[in-house]
Image: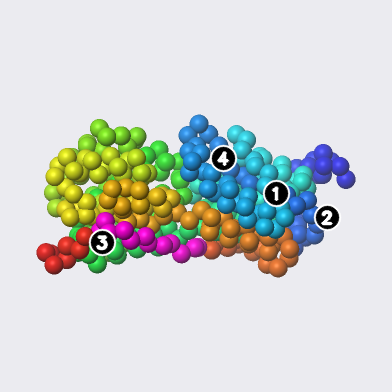
Amino acid sequence: MRNETKIKVMQAARELNYFPNAGARMLRGERTRLVALSSPMSDETAYGDWSPFFFGVARRLRHYGYDVLLLMGEDENEDLVRMSDSGLVDGVLLLDVAMSDPRARAAKTSRVPVASIGCPDDLDGVYAVDLDFEQMGEMAVQKLMKAGHRHVLFLGANSHAYEQGVNFLIRTRDSVRICAEKAGMRLTCDVIDTGDADEMECVVERAFASDPRITAVLGQVGLIAMSNLKSALQSRGYDIPKDISVIQLGAFGQASVMNPPLDEIPLRPYATCARAVDVLMEIIEGKRRMSEQGTKELIEVKYLSRGSVHDVSKGV
């Protein structure tokens, strides 16, 4: 059957709400040795942040003798359906997955297995692999609580990112809030726009006006914003870590270049992507069954201690 005919048949099946079961979808001919990577692109895409995930996928796929086909059209959901029906790929990986993601919902009707790098709300038909961002938030709060900090500023990323449903930002933020409330920590929350020097001066001013007893900051922002935060704190007479403790969350492990170096709980793009590829390969090779209800697998986070958290418990 020609690819054009195959796509038309599958489209008709979708319109009739008929889909073969998961086992039948795995009955395939010769493998293509291609995996599609569905990755939304826009003018707002931060390519420096995106590239470790892309190369993490590509490098691990090469280990299995596979190549990656990047899907970056404006309609990622349509791309996924078209590629699944075409028979050109053996599987699909989803990248930059939002909390409510139409690609994840389309996965349950896919003719090829789908693994997600990121955990959407709807897991049906998807094997999702992601960092444990709930653990990230809990670990950060526990670290500060153990060091005696009870008044903390949580500095979030651009508000637009949360509105768009950026997965790791929302899950980490929500975990920090929940754990802080359970621990009896007073949490002052703010977000940034650009993170430039003037804005960070305003952020610090607002935070201490709201709670003059703040002794620590959890920053869910990049290095430039963290550097400007440090300068804004210093302009008010606060030195890190003597006067205020700082932990960076969800960046790329580069806060060691700060002066002073900052503690952080970073993203782990290579570990996350490698595991997602491994799982997809196991499904393609018939070594793992695909659950109709979907599966979630979380990777443990790591705390990088560099001395930017000061123990104030003796003074509490």
Q: CA distance from mark 2 to mark 1?
A: 15 Å
Q: Amino acid at mark 3?
A: Leu
Q: Earlier in the sequence, mark 4 or mark 1?
A: 4
Whether label 3 touches label 2, CB < 8 Å: no
Q: Residue under circle 4?
A: 40
Q: Residue under circle 2?
A: 30
Q: Is residue 249 visible to the viewer in this orientation of the structure?
A: yes
**Coordinates of residue 217 in the picture (x, y in percent):** 26, 51
- Could you say which disc has been placed on residue 21 in the image? none
Please tell me whether mark 2 sits on a helix, a strand or a loop. loop
Q: CA distance from mark 2 to mark 4?
A: 29 Å
Q: Mark 3, residues whose alpha carbon is within 10 Å: few (<14), some, or many (≥20)?
A: many
* Between 288 and 239, the one nearer to me in the picture: 239
Q: CA distance from mark 3 to mark 2?
A: 54 Å
* Between 23 and 193, the one nearer to me in the picture: 193
What is the span of residues highlighted in magenta in the rendered image?
A: 298-309
Residue at 14% in and 53% down: 213
Side (left or right) of 73 relative to 31: left
Query: Of discs 2 and 1, which sits in the foreground?
Result: 1
Whether label 3 touches label 1, CB < 8 Å: no
Q: Residue under circle 1?
A: 67
**Coordinates of residue 136 in the picture (x, y in percent):** 39, 59
Q: Earlier in the sequence, mark 2 or mark 1?
A: 2
Q: Amino acid at mark 1?
A: Asp
Q: CA distance from mark 3 to mark 1?
A: 44 Å
**Coordinates of residue 226 in the picture (x, y in percent):** 31, 44
Q: Amino acid at mark 4?
A: Pro
Please tell me whether mark 3 sits on a helix, a strand or a loop. helix
